[in-house]
Image: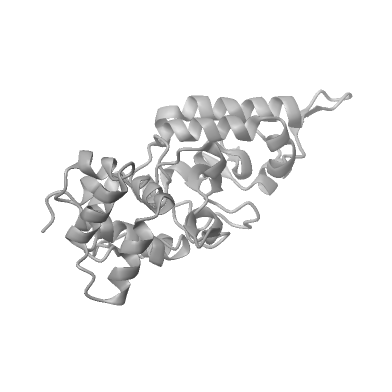
Amino acid sequence: MRYIDKRANEEEGNLITDGYLENECKTTDLLTGEVRYQNIDYAGSFSTGGYKKQMLELGMISQQRYCCYCLRKIGKSKSATLEHIIPQRADSTQGYDRFAELSNRQVMLTSEFTSAENQTKPPYPHTVAWNNLVVSCDGRFPIDNQVSSHCCNNARSSEYAPPVYYLPDLESRLVYMQDGTLQPLVGNRQDEIRATIGSAKLNCQSLKEIRRLWYLLRNCSYKEIISCLYDRNLRMKTLYSVLPMKDSAEVNMVFKYLKDEYWRTFMEYHLFYKIFQGKN
């Protein structure tokens, strides 16, 4: 994980939400002239009206196409998902409202927004609010010619996952171990970080394996690692150089990453090359 600055594209994000509320949800009482916003529906009119697609595309720009959780580079929009930080069916913002982006001045539950006497914005209804939507990968990895979801948005579902990527100093609060495990450093937000790591399954076997391999390859040139994608013999040589196959786990790992689809997935996590640079 790393810091996500929602303020950089906040104006554009809020404009998408404003456009949706004005075009799809606005009602005017014929007698009093009172304006209300009703029938806010993320899965319905927000999606079918093209607003979800706009929000996803802006989120991809905001995050430089990196998953908010696992840091995978999302190459295709079809593998990207919009993650509701405060779950869609949440009945409270408790725990999430500790973060400025999700304070009651910025976001409120959609059910409370629709029933509020004063519907001025912000705060925005949480199911369609820019500050409550981030881009996550679908957590899928190639496994025996099938695709399975292991982490991130799909794995998290509606579990409590504090948006620790809203902490500007997040990266200094994390440590990636040699075996690929992600751990929070001791500090005043470590419980929240640990909760998100657990909910988003960021220490699933597939992710630990990929991070471990980046650690092992940290002293190889990045150009060589890229070349391995197109040269299977070089890939084999490179894998043998860091995985001496002393046990069955290393043997299986070598044969797995000799497959093109696994190496392509591995390369989508190229940020870890920089993260592990200089580590002993």
Is residue 208 in view from this perspective? no
x, y percent for residue 68: 42, 46
* Position of residue 203 in the picture relative to residue 220 (left or right): right
x, y percent for residue 116: 69, 42
Please name the residue shown 61% across and 33% down the image.
53
Please name the residue shown 53% across and 31% down the image.
57
Q: Quadrant of residue 49?
A: top right
Q: How many marks?
A: 0
Q: Compared with residue 213, is residue 221 higher up or lower down, i.e. above or below? A: above
Residue at the far right: name it: 31
- Is the image coloured rainbow, by chain, by secondary structure, or in one colour? one colour
Q: Compared with residue 227, is residue 190 higher up or lower down, i.e. above or below? A: below
Residue at the far front: name it: 233
x, y percent for residue 10: 47, 30
> Which of the image's four quarters has the C terminus?
bottom left
x, y percent for residue 43: 70, 44
Q: Quadrant of residue 118?
A: top right
* Position of residue 44 in the picture relative to residue 236 (left or right): right
Is residue 119 in view from this perspective? yes
* Position of residue 240 in the picture relative to residue 78 (left or right): left
Please name the residue shown 33% across and 57% down the image.
210
Q: Nearer the viewer, residue 100 or 230?
A: 230
Q: Compared with residue 270, is residue 199 higher up or lower down, i.e. above or below? A: below
Please name the residue shown 59% across and 54% down the image.
87
Q: Nearer the viewer, residue 109 or 44?
A: 44
